[in-house]
Amino acid sequence: MIDPLVTTYRAREAQYAALRDAALAHTTRLIGEAGLKIHNITGRLKRADSLADKLRRKPGRYRSLEDVTDLVAVRVITYFESDVAAVSRLLEAHHEINWEHSVDKSMMHDPDRFGYMGVHYVVKVPPEVDQFIPHITEPPQHYEVQIRSILQHAWAEIEHDLGYKNREAVPREVQRRFYRLAGLLEMADEEFMALDRLSRDYAATLPERVQSEPDSVFIDAQSIKHLLDVSPVRDLDEAVAAALGVPLLTRWPDPERPQRLAALLHYVGVHSVGGLLGELRRNTGGILTFATRLLPRLPEAWLPAGGARPGTGLVNHALLRACANPSLDPQEIITALDMSGVLSTRQMVDVVLDTYAEISGEVKVDARHS
């Protein structure tokens, strides 16, 4: 026999789906406006057969659909456990929380607690969401928001797949391994948070360290990202762009470019910021001459972007060093930057070597030519 609540739910499923979509959009907007960096946000609508199973397991507990608080859920997955608290505070500030049906697992301090979950809130549908729900006689009043870190989510998903809902469900032989795993995941979450703090602290101190002790600063993605906005790297990029008569694309959407540029500089033997800055200041004229001779011969590699990309000067500096050192191969740089277009990588390498030979006055054929 089908429970009347299941029948009602199926009849109103479109309205609940609308609530899911509106709640997801609302939560996404709140988190975006707050500037919080998270892994992802998803929405979920309870299946009718899952509702039927829940009603069978707990007979008499639910008198109306409003008593079932998890028909609609929004799940927020953060990168770090500390971000769970930040998202929680944000939701508390913008929603009326049903505390009777909400739970914060982080507040459970039992040292041998079973499970590793985040925060589950049941929130009253706010006006910003309610306006997008089609009118029905008894509209939904609440939905659930789950907030977990990636590792908490991994635990919950695996635990659910294994079918273990609580401590009593787990055979005694495997309980100890569950506790050990929960401890390992908590330690991993803490270590990831520590790495995040160290990374942010490192980025915050970079400007001062580059200014006062550049030789002690290692070439990496973060130091390159900083250098792209300051002299002499920015000045060289602007000079190349001006010589080519194109804009410098200061807002070029390529977050991986600093990492690639760092790898290229390491390949050609430049490992410290101090060393790089010294070389750029000594060789600005040569780099500029090389770039303005080379790039017009390889329009396929950069012109489709509409201008010169940040770090153009560093790329040409790396190419110059590769050309000058027979043990290095310009092809490594071209391949790493995915510069090939209409021309093959081999053809581009030949153009690079020919340009280098031209500006350096060399007449002999480089052995690296095809």
Image (spheres, helix red, strand yellow):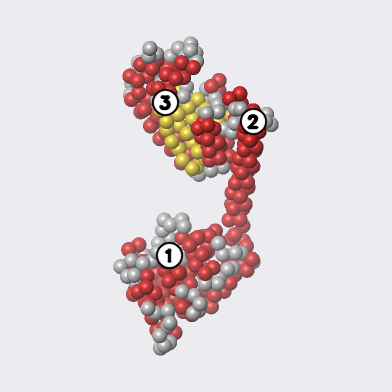
Disc 2 + disc 3, Cβ < 8 Å: no
Q: Mark 1: which amino acid?
A: Leu
- Relative to 158, say whether 265 is above or below: below
Sequence-first disc among 1 and 3: 3
- Relative to 345, say whether 53 is above or below: above
Q: Position of residue 28 (x, y in %)?
A: 44, 37
Residue to which mark 2 is pinned? 173
Which residue is at 53% across, 60% downward?
A: 221
Which residue is at 52% across, 69% downward?
A: 267
Q: Is residue 143 left or right of residue 132?
A: right
Q: Mark 2: which amino acid?
A: Glu
Camera-nearest label, 2 or 1: 2
Residue farthest toward the right in the current orientation of the protein = 111
Q: CA distance from mark 1 to mark 3?
A: 46 Å
Q: Secondary structure at mark 3?
A: loop
Disc 1 + disc 3, Cβ < 8 Å: no
- Relative to 165, say whether 344 is above or below: below
Q: Position of residue 24 (x, y in %)?
A: 42, 33
Q: CA distance from mark 2 to mark 3?
A: 33 Å
Number of residues whose C-alpha sits closer than 10 Å to that of mark 2, classed few (under 14), some (14–19) or many (20 or more): few
Q: Which mark is residue 46?
A: 3
Q: CA distance from mark 2 to mark 1?
A: 53 Å
- Of 23 and 34, which appears nearest the observer? 23
Number of residues whose C-alpha sits closer than 10 Å to that of mark 1, classed few (under 14), some (14–19) or many (20 or more): some
Q: Is residue 100 left or right of residue 55?
A: right
Q: Position of residue 45 (x, y in %)?
A: 40, 28
Residue to which mark 1 is pinned? 337
Residue 317 seen from this side: no
Q: Position of residue 346 (x, y in %)?
A: 37, 73
Residue 208 seen from this side: yes
